[in-house]
Amino acid sequence: SVIKPQGGTKIFSLQVQGIITYDTREQTSISSRVSGRIERLLIKYNYQPVKKGQLIMEIYSPDLAAAQRELLFIYQSDANNPMLQKAKERLSLLGMQQKQIQQVLKTGKISYRIPVYSNATGYILDNTAAANASTAAPAASPQSAPSDDGMGAMGSSSSAASNSSASTPTSSAIMLREGQYVGAGQSLFTIYTNKNLIAEFAFDPSVSSQIKKGQKLVFYEPSDKQTVYTGTIGLIQPVFKEGSNFTIARIYLQDNKFQTGKLVTAAIPIVSKGWWLPQSAVLNLGNKSIVFKKEQDVFVPREVKTKNNADGMVLIDQDISDWDIASNAAYMIDSESFIKTVSEHK
């Protein structure tokens, strides 16, 4: 049988998977103030909890020893020498605390190790893991479902969950090792705090134009669909990752009742306008879609651009308003013209 495309607007409730992760605005970096060799390392794995002031590592530093020798030489030559204060300031810049400097002056013994302390309370990552964590957005291929069974009616219904795959923070061994050399100013660790967390959702670019900063999103944990949370989109960012384009929508959470790594699902209304066909009329060949258009007395396979699949209907992203189309594309697959068309595209 032959059908005509249906034109109109549908309202979709698009479900997109996201992840609870750290707010990168709430992070601090730990760098080495001296060049030298890691003599002692107390951090063993990424996302290890640390407290402010906690000893992270000790670095053996020839530069530190040289600066202390200079301090002692000035002090022992003339304790009132104005250069003494400059020597103390240099040691302070290298990471020595005042009580350690006074201990050197008191005992005359040089310390070859400089301690490195945590400057915040949170979860620590080495610089390699932190770089990966900053791009831990999910790669999305969201599916949508219509909210109505007519043209232009207002309403909503749920859809299948998206095929998003999210990067979950996981504990892993750190890359730094005892005996490894580090340079002065080299970033060694990043500390994330869980004071504020974020929920990140990834949308297909085809619907990104309908997502706005300041827009409300309703989301929930898949394990507890009865508990619904509401958040406001605070950032929208186009992203290209692993060969895919998508758009990140980020909600800044005001509390830390969530756990990082938790998957969440958001629902957002999407308006789609165009020409619709039953799914049975469209043959999906993986990288392209085919319909059979009636031209005179023959059905000819034509490639069409599809935009959304939803509830048995397919949105065609081109004007096919005057086409007569076979209602069952699968029935036509053995036709000679179809085989010819496929071979022409090879």
Image (spheres, helix red, strand yellow):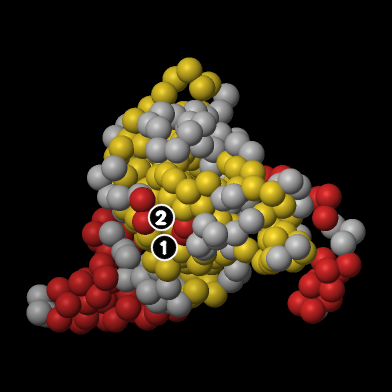
For the residue pair 28 and 210, the one nearer the viewer reads as 210
Say above or below: 134 vs 276.
below
Residue 17 locus on image (x, y percent): 53, 41
Quadrant into which the C terminus falls: bottom right
Pointer 2 and pointer 1: residues touching (CB < 8 Å)? Answer: yes
Q: Residue at x 75, y 63 (%)?
A: 297
Q: Residue furthest front?
A: 296
Q: Which of the two labelled residues, at mark 2 and mark 1, occupies the earlier sequence position?
A: 2
Question: Which amino acid does the dot numbered 2 rest on?
Answer: Ser
Residue 46 locus on image (x, y percent): 55, 50
Local secondary structure at mark 2: helix
Residue 260 locus on image (x, y percent): 48, 39
Determine the image quadrant of residue 67: bottom left
213 sits left or right of 307 in the view: left
For the residue pair 104 and 171, the one nearer the viewer reads as 171
Q: Closer to us: mark 2 or mark 1?
A: 2
Q: Residue at x 54, y 42 (%)?
A: 144
Local secondary structure at mark 1: strand
Q: Residue at x 27, y 64 (%)?
A: 101
Other-residue count near label 2 (Cα within 10 Å), few / some / many at <14 / 14–19 / ≥20: some
Say above or below: 235 vs 313.
below
300 sits left or right of 335 in the view: left
User: Residue 132, which numbered label?
Assistant: none
Question: Which amino acid does the dot numbered 1 rest on?
Answer: Pro
Say above or below: 180 vs 27.
below
Q: In the rendered image, which residue does mark 1 sit on? A: 238
Q: Residue at x 25, y 75 (%)?
A: 90
Determine the image quadrant of residue 301: bottom right
For the residue pair 106 and 31, the one nearer the viewer reads as 31
Q: In the rendered image, which residue does mark 2 sit on? A: 208
Other-residue count near label 1 (Cα within 10 Å), few / some / many at <14 / 14–19 / ≥20: some
